[in-house]
Amino acid sequence: GAGVSQSPSNKVTEKGKDVELRCDPISGHTALYWYRQSLGQGLEFLIYFQGNSAPDKSGLPSDRFSAERTGGSVSTLTIQRTQQEDSAVYLCASSLEVTRGRPQPQHFGDGTRLSIL
Amino acid sequence: QKEVEQNSGPLSVPEGAIASLNCTYSDRVSQSFFWYRQYSGKSPELIMSIYSNGDKEDGRFTAQLNKASQYVSLLIRDSQPSDSATYLCAVTTRQGNLIFGKGTKLSVKP
């Protein structure tokens, strides 16, 4: 079946502009995650959705970052007034429902490479 | 601060050898552990999951978990040049998301 789909695959924009990144999870996956990976660095957790609610927003780096998910499916990550340090690959992952007994493996999309000029 | 620690490498092994990748974690509550492989310029790909103490084998890969020591490892037998990648260790939090280590870069020399 189809994997996690992210769009756009690449985005170049000027400093100060707003950007919106989209993630379409694997069908049937209720949990959705956003991560950021800067060049040569590890994965930085941003936010996690279980259905439409976000139990953990602790990773959002500033109030310029926000994310929403509607209908328990597609999610958008919005970065307002972009800065050069926002340049990174933004990765989305999805998994089956998270339960106390057994967190599920996450499957990643190909990411959006964001470059702020 | 919950952390996952990995040696950044690079770890260089000859083709056909066993590659051993190690990871330690700080949160004793963690229940699930994953190894991801990430080729340069690509997204992480799940290769192993382990939930109980002991060994779990899948083909050339063996994951080992010791919750008492808060240690998880990945062994790759008969290493191939195509195994050259960065290997990420990931550990679940109470909220259900993952914390990733910074990864170990493995290079398998022909």
Image (tube, rainbow, N blue to C red):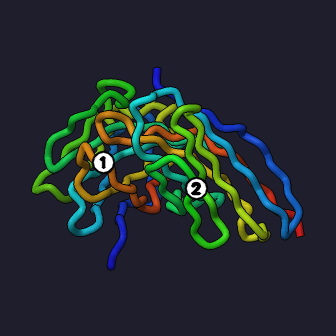
The residue pinned by badge 1 equals A20
Q: Residue at x 57, y 39 (%)?
A: B101
Q: Residue at x 30, y 45 (%)?
A: A77
Q: Nearer the viewer, mark 1 or mark 2?
A: 2
The residue pinned by badge 2 equals B55
Q: Residue at x 54, y 63 (%)?
A: B47
- Residue B50 located left or right of residue A48: right
Rendered view: A109 above or below B2? below
For marks 1 and 2, give the CA distance. 43 Å
Q: Name the image quarter holding the C terminus of chain B.
A: bottom right
- Tell me the subunit letter for badge 2: B
- Where is residue A72 shown, x and y percent of the image? 14, 55
- Where is residue A107 shown, x and y percent of the image? 40, 60
- Tell me the subunit letter for badge 1: A
- Where is residue B38 shown, x and y percent of the image? 60, 57
Q: Nearer the viewer, residue B26 or B105?
A: B26
* Category of crowding for the residue at label 2, using alpha-carbon neighbours closer than 10 angstroms: few (below 14), some (14–19), many (at least 20): some
- Residue A80 located left or right of residue B99: left
